[in-house]
Amino acid sequence: MPLIPDFASLLADATSLQAPAGATYASGVRNAFVFTSRARRTAAAPADGFVGPLSIAQEQVQTNPGDFFRGARTSLLPYIAMAINPKSIRWKQPKRFTKKDTRDGSVFFHFLNSKGQNNDILTLEFRGSTGNIDPRGSIQDDQPQDPDQPLSREQDTGALRKFIVWQNLYLLSREPMLLPDGTENVFTITYISPLFPQAINFNGFFNEVLEFEENAEKPHSREYTFQFTVQSTEPDLDELLDVLLSVLQNATSQPDATATIFGSNVEIISP
């Protein structure tokens, strides 16, 4: 029996994933975080120039991603759906002000935006784990091993898919900021959680390439961290309260409604 399942099938499953359209956490179904970029959607764009159901992808793609991906196009995921969501996400958004001391006390100067707020730029800090990426984990030892039979899908624990997803995320953090024609390569994270039960698109850029450590104490998994600077959101965070209340009211009025499910990458939350 082969130790590695059908790589082509795994890759086909991963590349067929699409980002959630109007997904909701309210009914207890957890959707995965989804990462993408304009360069990836361009590289994967069909002839008509449109990719996927996300509002960020409803754009006519006329740009050229260039040679950055080279031979990796066959294993390129236009939408990177996390096999295991990050363990923690820290939101950091300080205030913009300066303190000046005078003879009579202290003076605070606040630097305001167009809305009169002194909010600085939002930064998201992610910490996560790849999970088990040992390809041998795709075989259950208690199953009969017939050398003439390929590994069944039921026996696949997802080790190779986790590996493919992480490698794509690592490559995403290394992508250029501009496409060859000068178009900005905007990076987007689709975020959904119990605190934000309606999907939010965070548009921005990575502060650094994914940071990780090869540790012999965890030979078959890796911890990783990265930071993401948010330039804009869909919907606007200042309008999010009305959106979230609407989602929760709909969930209350229709308790049996089923949330949008993103592929097979979901978890049921116990009450």
Image (cartoon, rainbow, N blue to C red):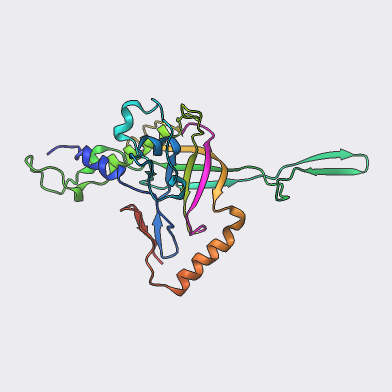
Magenta span includes 199: yes
Range shown magenta: 195-210
Task: State the residue at coordinates (41%, 67%).
Answer: 271
| Front position in the image: 116 or 165 | 116
239 over 107 or under it: above or below: below
Magenta span includes 57: no
28 over 104 or under it: above or below: below
| Front position in the image: 242 or 166 | 242
Position in image of residue 21 (x %, y %): 41, 55
Task: State the residue at coordinates (19%, 39%).
Answer: 6
Q: Is residue 37 left or right of residue 244?
A: left
Q: Is residue 149 left or right of residue 218?
A: left
Question: Is residue 222 at least partly visible in the picture?
Answer: no
Position in image of residue 161 (x %, y %): 30, 42
Position in image of residue 43 (x %, y %): 37, 34
Q: Tally the numbered discs.
A: 0
Q: Which residue reaches farthest right?
A: 103
Q: Which residue reaches farthest bottom?
A: 253
Question: Is residue 8 at least partly visible in the picture?
Answer: yes
**Quadrant (top left/top right/bottom left/bottom right) for the N terminus:** top left
Task: State the residue at coordinates (58%, 63%).
Answer: 242
Position in image of residue 78 (x %, y %): 37, 40
